[in-house]
Amino acid sequence: MRPSSNDQRHRTGNDQRHRTGLAGLTGPAGPAVPADGTGPADLVERWSGRPVLVVGDAMLDEWRFATSTRLCREAPAPVLTLDRRQIAAGGAANTAVNLAALGARPLLVAPIGVDPVGDQVARCLHQAGVQDRMVAQPGTRTPVKRRLLAADQILLREDDGGPAGPLPAEQVERLLAALVASTEEIRLDHAEPDVDGTGAHPDGARPDLVICDYGLGALPDRIRQWLIRHRDRYGTVALDTHDLTRWAGLRPTLITPSIAEAAPAVGQPTPDRDRVAAARRLLPRLHAATGADLVAVTLDTDGSVVGDRSGATHHCRTEPVAASRAVGAGDAYLAALTLSVVAGATLPVAAGLAQLAAALTVRDCGTCICHRDALTAALSESFPAAASGGGRRVTTPAATPAAGTDPANLVEQVRVQRAAGARIVFTNGCFDVLHRGHVGYLAEAAALGDLLIVAVNSDHSVRRLKGPDRPVNPVEDRVAVLAALTSVDHVVVFEEDSPAGLIERIRPDVYVKGGDYPPDMVPEAPLVRRLGGAVHILGYVADRSTSAVINRIRSAAAPAGPAGGRAGRPGTHPTPEAHQELEAHPEGAR
């Protein structure tokens, strides 16, 4: 899907912890660059100067910003005063601009009209550092999308230009010649020496290719069939198209359809609810139908679901923004996802970098462009440890305060960490006397994602739930012990009897509970699922519970009974205090 000049596309998680990446993705392109634990910031450096060929529908985005203080007398319409005008490259041209802004060296091959609009597109490309290989098409008007805004609200969009019909055969041949020449230009410019005399060129000499097919005539059948037949001339191939069925046989490295484009491509109706789950179900069919190694299905306000051929998936969430701020965010996403795969990123890191790139562009109205400096600054600011290295965590958090992480600060940290691809796992409990069962449970929970948050009941909350003699350890001690575990990233304290408020704010990807009951019996399950998360039940370690530990301690400390036994044990007469403890915790709760 092209989510830039045509539609608002919200950008943005995995079903298991990913320790392997996109390395090993096979197909006509051969294996990707090995995933070696490189951090996100290092990946940005790795793709710097990388040549990328872009082919497809180029257009111009024109923005007219106005103010309005009254309605006209002729009709209930606002009277607008034009304040400023802004132009930007759109479509395939904006994808090329984003590639350049992120540090790559793109070449753009596209038909362009011989008109002032075409000249404006060319100027935008020149200013952005894109190598212009567009082919002038006499008699064709360059597509332009004009948007009129007041108070950041799009009031009107006018679409103009575009081909009146199929390109003449002569012009198609000129376009094909430019495509072949640009492919060869990149290949020869970056080919390594032929040291063995075979004349073979290494994989590194093959251009990476981005195809942007939005149905405006830039990729007629002759061009499309040539690209399919000569797929092996290219390394990584990214395909963004409204109609995936047109490209059967291409075997791209990655595709980025919307859910509305993905479902019909495999003969399924477009879902109107539970779209995250529906997208996950579509992934295997999309892999089979297109031959793509990586599939990113976009879901508007539900984010995106990205999966590879191994069956691993990664759900990226997003925060909705005004449509006037999202134009071109998908171009930034496509550019960053392509470069991440080219650089050998793991699945969650590639998806997270693409989401972060798009998220950085939606802060103002206009066509979205993500710049490399902004991306690296966001990475280094949010993830100083992980920005330059791999490992289990996306970040290494600071020491947890005695009172636990401040909830507002935690919500912000989760937001930026999720933007970089972290899968958030959340669990909660009293954790009064930490024991082997807790340690194993938390280690299992951590293995379900990238960031584990443990919510702990406050002392008042524990007393309401467990009785007046609990907790044994005050909340400061419980927080300190939990925070010392390597499996735990953040500890947060809540006063309520239920963590529902925290769940609502944190929106975990996985909510973990311990027990032997089905997920549907977890009180928080409906809320977690409504927020797009999953519920996972982990079994307790047998004979390991806080209440059992406390009972053994108190029984051992009680004075001996008349028969020489201990109070509270079978065959003895428990003291009233011991009897009260046994009755207060019959369930062996944690």
Image: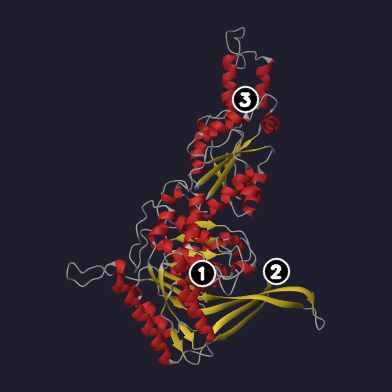
Q: Can residue 570 be seen in this view?
A: yes
Q: Which residue lies furthest to the right in this view?
A: 73
- Upstream in sequence: badge 1 or badge 3: 1
The residue where tag 1 is placed is 331
The residue where tag 2 is placed is 151
Secondary structure at numbered mark 1: helix
Secondary structure at numbered mark 2: loop
Disc 3 marks a residue whose amino acid type is: Val
Secondary structure at numbered mark 3: loop
- Residues at discs 1 and 3 in contact (Cβ within 8 Å): no
Task: Give the percent coordinates (x, y) of residue 180.
Answer: 35, 81
Mark nearest the camera among 2 and 1 is 2
How far is disc 2 from disc 1 in space, using C-alphas? 24 Å
Q: Which residue lies furthest to the front in this view?
A: 83
Figure check: 398 above or below 3: above
Disc 1 marks a residue whose amino acid type is: Asp
How far is disc 3 from disc 2 in space, using C-alphas? 57 Å
The residue where tag 3 is placed is 472
Mark 2 residue crowding within 10 angstroms, few (<14) / some (14–19) / many (20+): few
Mark 1 residue crowding within 10 angstroms, few (<14) / some (14–19) / many (20+): many
